[in-house]
Image (tube, rainbow, N blue to C red):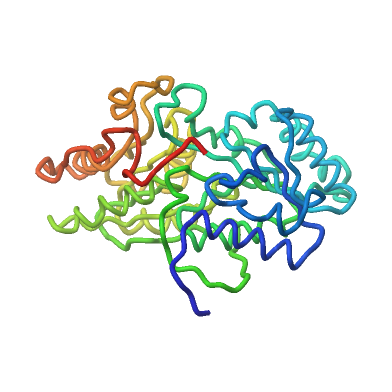
Amino acid sequence: MSSREITYGEAILEATRQMMLSDDRVMLMGLGVSDPGGIFGTTKGLFDEFGPDRVVETPTAESGVMGIAIGSSLVGMKPIVTHQRVEFSLLSYEQIVNQAAKWNYMTAGKKYVQIVVRLIIGRGWGQGPQHSQSLEPIFAHVPGLKVIAPSSPSDAKGLLAAAINDPNPVVMLEHRWLHQTYGEVSPDLYQQEIGRSKIVHVGTDITIVTYSYMVIEALRAARELANVGVSAEVIDLTSLRPLDFDTIEKSIGKTGTLLTIDNGWSTYGIGAEIVARAASDCFDALKKPPIRLGVADVPIPSTRALANLVYPGFNSIVDSVSSILGRDLSRLKQKSICVEDVPDKSFTGPF
């Protein structure tokens, strides 16, 4: 397939539009979906093209909106529900966990909820404890849900298209720092299998497993580590549930080491699940104890200076690799590039 460079946000918009054109059952719902800014550009222009029957601007009534989406799915529609922050979805968590996730099981496979829930996660603009969290473990914990977390524009497009057609309810996590990143994406409509991780940097000394925005930081660290003779293998999970542990296990068998990086707190996190699986399935292959890296175990601070202290990044990855391998890598550590709680000056918000 031919490809060209577009942003992560544009890839989501393109997948949504192409799926809506190919299947008139696909509809979009959420607060701000008709806004000119289009939720980081991911819904821009869709209201004008498809109208209010298929692009539904909703009130701030998240539980009710989710109930409407679930009901729409049960009569044949394929709703995409978008929340501009993951925290907003907490008001509809009962609907997601107790209704959408269980309907197929409770009807002995006769009925299913075919719905995608898009959630914006991650840091930015000093939004603090209630608006900049990454809460993926509370969704990945639930049987009946699928949870995806693409890090690249091409994965975002392919996984969203697959999620819309998946008979299971799918939660899609989008880190707000990814929407303006660029990557090669085919203009054609395509689907990418949910539940397959990707080795995005091949290495032999240490296995680094992560997802979403932290893949960017892990790759940056892997390139710098290579300059001092440390070969890091970086695995992009892309899917948190189902979890492709086979790829992780093979990598641990090669490197004998493991570093996991969560986008949120590491306590009870995705990394904790991976380390637990490694301890039970790959114990003999591990040469050193694994390390879980993530946000400091405190509520997210609003103060920019403090925010820079709680998030994992390049320097904390280097420190963790240094600890696991027993090598002094302090010369690689750099001054933070996130002094204003934004990835770069082009990053604007809040929407």
Q: Nearer the viewer, residue 222 or 188?
A: 188
Q: Is residue 48 left or right of residue 227?
A: right
What residue do we see at 36% from left, 36% from top?
292
What residue do we see at 44% from left, 49% from top?
178
Residue 343 place in picture, x, y as percent = 34, 43
Residue 347 place in picture, x, y as percent = 39, 43
Residue 222 place in picture, x, y as percent = 26, 54
Quick check: 287 above or below 338?
A: below
What residue do we see at 76% from left, 32% from top?
95
Q: Quadrant of residue 98?
A: top right
Quick check: 140 above or below 64?
A: below
Q: Nearer the viewer, residue 304 or 286?
A: 304
Q: Nearer the viewer, residue 44 or 194?
A: 44
Residue 278 place in picture, x, y as percent = 43, 44
Q: Nearer the viewer, residue 222 or 350?
A: 350
Instruction: Single out the residue that lies furthest toward the bottom.
Output: 1
Count of numbered circles in the view? 0
Quick check: 239 above or below 264?
A: below
Q: Quadrant of residue 309?
A: top left
Q: Is residue 134 left or right of residue 341?
A: right
Quick check: 198 above or below 291?
A: below
Q: Is residue 106 left or right of residue 3?
A: right
What residue do we see at 80% from left, 47% from top?
113
Q: Is residue 65 left or right of residue 196?
A: right
